[in-house]
Amino acid sequence: MGRQGDYPQPGVPLPRSVTRRGLFKTAAATGVAGLTVGVLSSCNSQGDTTRQPTVVDSGQADYVIDPTTNESNFESVDLPLTDEKSYELPVGVVLLPGDEDWIPATSAGSSAYPMVKASAFSVSSGKLVDVVEEPRSKDQVTTVIYDVCCSNDAFAWVELNLITRSWVLYASSFKKGELTGEVSTLWKADANYDPPSLAVSGKKVIWLVMPSTTGESTEESSYAYLWEAGADDATVVVESPGRFATDPAVSDGVVTLTPRVRADEGVYYGATAYSLDDDLSSVVDQLVLPQTVKPLNATRIGDVFAVSIEASYSTGGLLGEMGTYIGTSDGSFVALSREPSAPVSGKDGLFVVKSQASYFVVNTEDRTYAVLQAVNRAVDYGEYPARAGTCDTFVTYATVKDQDTGIPASVTVRTFKV
């Protein structure tokens, strides 16, 4: 089926006054309930495509821990985060990054079907609610809730058919733990396109549609879309001539995407911060990575980028080495040479970086660091963050083993004042 309906070829935009509502009639005929939005063509720039890649020597980095001697260059101090609250949730709950009080979660079904429920967790109250208890698809036996994202005002989720690999993206208005508006079908596609990565902030939903690396559409461009809860139409906001490198990351009014840039010269990814206030029509800043270097995560915190590189490359200088880098395109970076596994959080020069089972809490202003240890009896990989980017309250969750049996028995959520 590919993209829904008679979708035009990439690079051939529709007139701005024309929507694709007519292209979604198949969805209505097959019983997918709810409003199906159209799409307006309004594709924005990837950023400054003439900006030079940032290639700096590894000797120019301000390392928190020297990678050659393993000695500290920053002063070790007591943990600057203030421990606030702790909650216990049922085993199987997974929290996902969110930037408001209600954050997305998935929880295990009470039986084989549904396997997964789309849920939401209130950081302030510790309340966990099941928002979508089973897939909306008629092929319920083979379809699962695959991903979820939310804010205080909007809720989005992806349903994936495990047999055909086709998927549908739904969204709705959301308030106080409940869907409050009509459910909208934002997008649907077959196995030639990967399930979309999502970000939700306020009433806005951002998602990426990218061709699968093994399907029939590998040569197509990828696109970022934006929809506001209650609207009839979504908008194409960014095109990437190839796959985006990272999930969209919302932080303090900006959305960081990593489209391919300088495509006529090779494989370059540009960590690009777009203004959410004007629906990603303007670029706040951009960091072009060295050739072939693909970041794992990228977000904007304050006036710097926090970029994670999960592999070491034979070229590229500092940013071609595994680690987490905090800085800008002028080449000034604070570096932590540890294998990254999650996005960075923080504010005002204080950054929380996951490292195996614990976190480094790095203050780039006074050149200090502390370690946040995982909760007692956490499983091997410790706690994971439920925040990404700028935050006042840092949130973690971890599956915890029973003291007597050693079997995972609950999920502990902790919050810290940044």
Image (cartoon, rainbow, N blue to C red):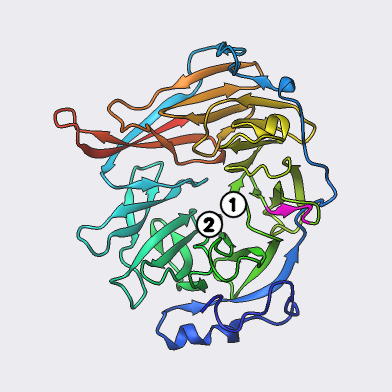
Query: How far apart are the two marked residues, 1 and 2, measured between alpha carbons?
Result: 6 Å
Q: On the image, which quarter does residue 375 sit in? A: top left
- Residue 339 image label: none
Q: Quick one: label 1, few (<14), some, or many (20+) residues within 10 Å?
A: many
Q: Quick one: label 2, few (<14), some, or many (20+) residues within 10 Å?
A: many
Q: Left or right: where does residue 352 sit relative to residue 287? A: left
- Residue 198 image label: 2
Residue 38, horizontal then vertical, whole percent: 60, 78
Asked if 40 appears above or below 323 in the picture, the reply is below
Under mark 1, the amino acid is Pro
Under mark 2, the amino acid is Leu
As rendered, which of 333 and 217 lies closer to the eye? 217
**Which region shows up in magenta?**
259-263
Q: Left or right: where does residue 32 sit relative to residue 275? A: left
Q: Left or right: where does residue 360 sit relative to residue 383? A: right
Asked if 127 appears above or below 167 in the picture, the reply is above
Asked if 255 appears above or below 343 in the picture, the reply is below
